[in-house]
Image (cartoon, coloured by chain):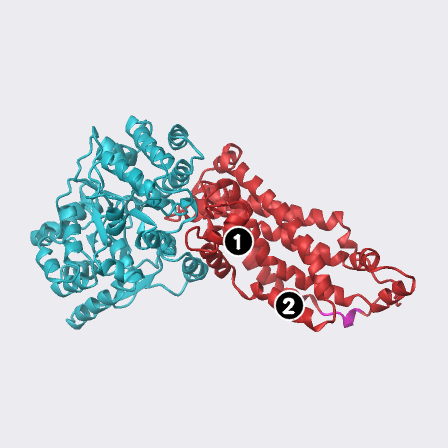
Chain colours: A cyan, B red
Amino acid sequence: MKLRSPSSILALAAAAVLATAACGTSGPGTGDTVTVWGLQDTALNPVQQKAIKAYNAKGDHPEVRLQTFVNDPYKQKLQTALGSPNAPDVFSNWGGGNLRTYVKAGNVVDLSPMLKSDPSLKKAFLPIVLNGARLDGKYYGLPLQGMQPVSLYFNKDVFAKAGIAKPPATWDDLLGAIDKLKAKNVQPIALAGSQSWTELMWMEYLLDRVGGPEAFAAIEKGEPGAWQAPAVKTALNMIVDLVKRGAFGTNYGSVGQDNGAADALLSHGKAAMELMGSWEYSAQLAAAPKFVNGGKLGWTAFPTVPGGKGDAANIVGNPSNFFSVTTKSKKKQAAQDFIKTSLTDPAYVNDLVKIGQVPPLTGVKAKLQAAPHADFTTYIYDLVAKAPSFQQSWDQALDPATSEKMLTNLQKVFNRQQTPEQFVAAMAG
Amino acid sequence: MAAVADRSARPGAIWAAPALVYFAVFALLPMALVVYLSFTRWNGLGSPHWTGLANWSYLLRDPQVIQSLKLSGILTAVTWAFQTAVSLPLGVWAAGPQRGRAVLSAVFFTPLLISSSGIAVLWKALLDPNFGLATIFGPWVGVDDGNFIGRPSLALWTIMAVISWQFIPFHTLLYQSATRQIPSVLYEAATVDGAGRFQQFRAITLPQLRHTIITSSVLMIVGSLTYFEVVLIITGGGPGAATRILPLDMYLTGFSAFQMGYASVLSVLLLAVGTALSLLIVRVTGYRRMTSQREGL
């Protein structure tokens, strides 16, 4: 989800450069350094650099160096570099299906022995997040940054004007709120329909609420008939119902997320709600500080669906990003030592909290309460800590080919170019 | 003219070597690799697996490729016709000596200074239906909610308009400079003979621009088979697959779905279509004969 968001121009430019860079000079691996590949992130990178500097200062181990890349080209570069002699020692990834491809190709070191030898390390992380990098019972990565579950955000002023006393807790509440908002001529829900991963969030939550986590688990495993399950069709029909009701207005297909257009609808009061990852808070804080600091931005868990099989506390989104060690690395021990030491270092965790992240660590709540924006960060922490299931974004969990096909077909359902039955047929075929 | 030229005056074949090596390494070799990859299954990790004709037989069953070809065909035909119809008269007009025309031409040519990605990001912002210009000019053209790129039936037309906006200045420039090359004696003679402006345009300007029309058309038609960044940034091929033209289909198959083998099939297809089209144009129009338009002048 979020990993698609950095601007596509940079992605394009970088892709062109990468085509040549991948063949030659960028090769780490040799010499007395541990090369770490990460994603470009203006808030996170300085925190990482600081932690690495502190780690290097402690001496007596190879020097650690961080290289960062823009999101989309990073995936392309990683895919080609991992199997080559130019592989980094440590690389950032999204866990799940994305990591599975690399594990299958034998490119990733199993970290289970390290976790077994150090029980306090394993206990330091919230299990539900650590499991994001757990494949077939083995751990292949450690969470490197904050958790990003998806929640329903809303504009409190707009709710008040439409006479909506409390945020929708059930599906019927949501439908009722939509009717009230439409009567006031406000678009009920902001949706960036030109970027289908924003539409996917609705599908992820609805399938979980209707069919429980096992419905997608079957799809992820590639079980025959998984896409044809009745829950998939029910969830898609609920989406079609929302579209028909005008819940997203009429022109959502032209709205973008990367350029902040959907977020602006919410902060300007042109729309009342938006389903988005936890980065919505910092995005709104940067783009519309008055809106957030004035206490007008509200948030709540996704509504329950009557008769659904999924637990109301289940969540979807990005558990975290993970640092994994490559099998091609000549410094495997040093690389493991680095991620083990630096990711749970109190100074690093404090810095993460300072930039508004919610680290997936047990017992971080006290730190969150003492930091700014505690009402939001503790909400996120509790949401994840209490969740029985944290489903990773489908576009990360599924293999790239299926994911690409699914996003295109889902967009067709939202645009009513395709019926739920046609979606199922396309995905099952 | 001497029947046989002095051979020693000709440059040796060795002079062509740098260009030939460059062409071999950066054009022929990648093409050969793409043809090889088209017979394999490869996701970028590890080594490609030889799968024989599997990718090629999937090409015949792939419903998307037919739609993509159709979209590319429409895009090529419409943008070619529209751009030519606008840039030819505009170029001829801009070729005039008046000062005002020079100033206006300079304004017209500004899109040439912006990179494709810049143009795409700019238009994406303009086309935002809630905060962009689309809210204003949408109602003028009957799109009340400004939903230009979100409506499947409208998205391709919007893309074609942006592409035309981007490239018309370049082709206008071609026509402007070509028009300025036309000897003024032709017009003077025609004026003496009593020909009006439109007659002069039809009997002198158009025939004299023949080679330029062909060059500009080849550039547009072959070009429309390769440009995709504008589409990628503005619609990403959507809504659904409504603007998923063939080059974009190839890119998404290769770098989003990581099916490098099948993406290579698509790029071989593009290569073949592009080569065939330019050969066809050159042959049909007699461009190859390189006959002079100015004999006797």
Position of A401 compared to A155: left or right? right
Position of A377 compared to A289: left or right? left
Chain to which the residue tagged by mark 2 belongs: B
The main secondary structure of the magenta stretch is helix
Asked if marks 2 and 1 touch (Cβ < 8 Å), the reply is no
Kind of residue at disc 1: Pro
Q: Indicate the position of residue A366 as horizontal and vertical percent values.
A: 8, 58
Q: Indicate the position of residue A8 as horizontal and vertical percent values.
A: 41, 56
User: What are the residue bounds of the magenta stretch?
Assistant: B7-11
Q: Secondary structure at mark 1?
A: helix
* Mark 2 or 1, closer to the camera: 2
- Give whichever of B282, B100 is nearer the camera: B100
Residue B175 visible in the current orientation: no
Q: Is residue A269 magenta?
A: no
* Vertical arrangement, residue A353 with respect to residue A181, above or below: below
- Give whichever of A274, A39 is nearer the camera: A274
Per the image, the residue denoted by label 1 is B30
Q: Is residue B9 magenta?
A: yes
Chain to which the residue tagged by mark 1 belongs: B
How many numbered marks, from 0 up? 2
Per the image, the residue denoted by label 2 is B104
> Marks 2 and 1: same chain?
yes
Q: Who comes first in sequence, dot 2 or dot 1?
A: 1
* Vertical arrangement, residue B62 with respect to residue A10, above or below: above
Residue A317 visible in the current orientation: yes
> At 56% from the left edge and 42% from the top edge, which residue is drawn?
B71
Kind of residue at disc 2: Leu
Q: Distance from label 2 to label 1 (Cα)?
A: 43 Å
> At 54% from the left edge and 49% from the top edge, which residue is drawn?
B140
Q: Indicate the position of residue A369 as horizontal and vertical percent values.
A: 10, 58
- Give whichever of A247, A47 is nearer the camera: A247
> At 86% from the left edge and 65% from the top edge, which residue is drawn?
B186
